[in-house]
Image: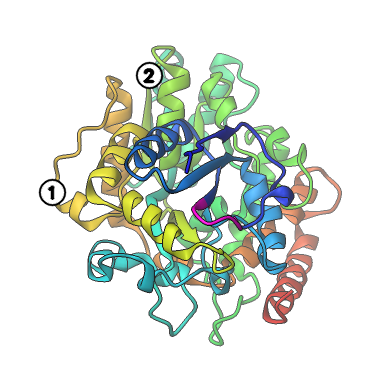
Amino acid sequence: MQKILSIAATASALAIAASAQAGDVRIMWYSDGIEGEVMQDLLDRFSEQNPDINVTLDNVAYQVIQEQLPIQLAAGEGPDIARVTNLKEQADHWLDLTPYIEDPAYWNENFGDQFDWMRPDDTEIIPGFMTQLTLVGGFANKTLFEQAGVEMPGEGATWEDWVNASTEVQESQQLPAAFVIDRSGHRITGPMISYGAQLKGEDGKPAPLDAAAQEFITQLVGWTESGQHMKDVWVSAAGTTYRAGADEFINANIAFYYSGSWQVANLTTKIGDGFDWVATGSPCGAAGCSGLPGGAALVANKNTQNPEDVGKVMDYLASTEVVKEFTERTLFLPAHQGVIKAGDLDFQTDDANAKAALEVFVAATGDLLPEANAIPAWRYANAVYGGMVSRISQAMAGEMPVADIFARIDNDIAEQVAAADAGQ
């Protein structure tokens, strides 16, 4: 059978259904940087070795993964394999790969630490593997700080320290804003936990936003109203739409950017030698200096018509050699225990900024608070993320006082939890 490999620059996810022809495997994939190109190259080699399996890599926007893929899965459709970050909430849709992979013990040994992030509670299925681990954290434009004569905050610096120092840079260099956080509930969860927020109630469901969570949100809206936090990134999008602030950092419009480790490859590719930048870890609150762990996973869709072929593709992509190469070329943090313990990763970049940044993120994993570590395996995490973003954006836009959004956020989250429990 002739092998077909293709990349669609964009695709209507609603047109992508689980492959019905024997030997066909479709992968829905999104990219933060260059990883789609790397994945295509790896799949080209798989196809040379497995001419009886047709693999199609559909590159789609992240928004398709977040908004359209769940609709397909609920309808019993969807791609055979998907790269997702919404791991736990959709766990009921993932295929147990155990009967279709060669060595389940290899998978458990190397990827087992994160299986609970993506499989239904109280099950032992193997649904897929993490393509990379991520950690939320900050980046600073070192060149702008030096030009402004402002010393960058050091270890143990608080959010206020970083905002104040970045504001000095903003005023000195006449920047549009001092800093920006990606428009994402995920991104502000680590800071809220660092402030002492307890997001999970005793019943395992989201608790009402407590004083610590409200304190950080109130400060963030205040920093936006004062022009320190870049307003446009949050108010130019609607609903729960994700918007990164990376371009503002890359274009040197801000001094400090709070996003995560997945941005390292993007920054080194687009900034080049434009200016020096550093990773900072996460600023501190009263409870700690925690980011939020997470990552993206490749998971198999239980609606697939070709589980044996899917198992072969997943075995190849999860192999030690392929994971190591993918990690080195994409500058991601690996999730494969064997690759981590070998300690011989050779990140393929000549950018000293990137190599130093990866070391900072690896070190920052030691600052994670237990509450942050528990979030990826919490099925209601996305309900909390989504409930916060739109209301905080409304407060930033001046549509309502920040004090009025907390009850609305609690109500929005409760509605999403009820919908999730009802299987909607």
Q: Amino acid at mark 1?
A: Ala
**Residue 236 point in image, percent of width and height:** 77, 37
> Would you identify the image quadrant in which residue 39 lies?
top left
The one nearer the camera, 350 or 394, is 350
Q: Is residue 232 above or below residue 341?
A: above
**Residue 246 point in image, percent of width and height:** 55, 31
The one nearer the camera, 110 or 229, is 110
> Would you identify the image quadrant in which residue 9 lies?
top right
- Taking the spot 63% from the left edge, 40% from the top edge, the residue there is 61
Q: Which residue is mark 2?
A: 276
**Residue 342, disc:** 1
The one nearer the camera, 400 or 376, is 376
**Residue 319 point in image, percent of width and height:** 27, 51
Q: Is residue 286 above or below residue 65?
A: below
SS assignment at label 2: loop
- Locate the C terminus by quadrant: bottom right
- Taking the spot 32% from the left edge, 25% from the top edge, the residue there is 353
> Would you identify the image quadrant in which residue 289 lies?
bottom left
Counting other residues with Cα less than 10 Å from the Cα at mark 2, is it few (<14), some (14-19), or many (20 or more)?
some
Q: Is residue 232 above or below residue 414?
A: above
Say if the magenta span includes residue 85: no
Side of 19 where 151 appears, left or right: left
Side of 6 where 279 appears, left or right: left
Counting other residues with Cα less than 10 Å from the Cα at mark 1, is it few (<14), some (14-19), or many (20 or more)?
few
Q: Which residues are magenta?
A: 19-24
Per the model, the C-alpha gap separating discs 2 and 1 is 30 Å
- Taking the spot 39% from the left edge, 61% from the top edge, the residue there is 311
**Residue 27, disc:** none
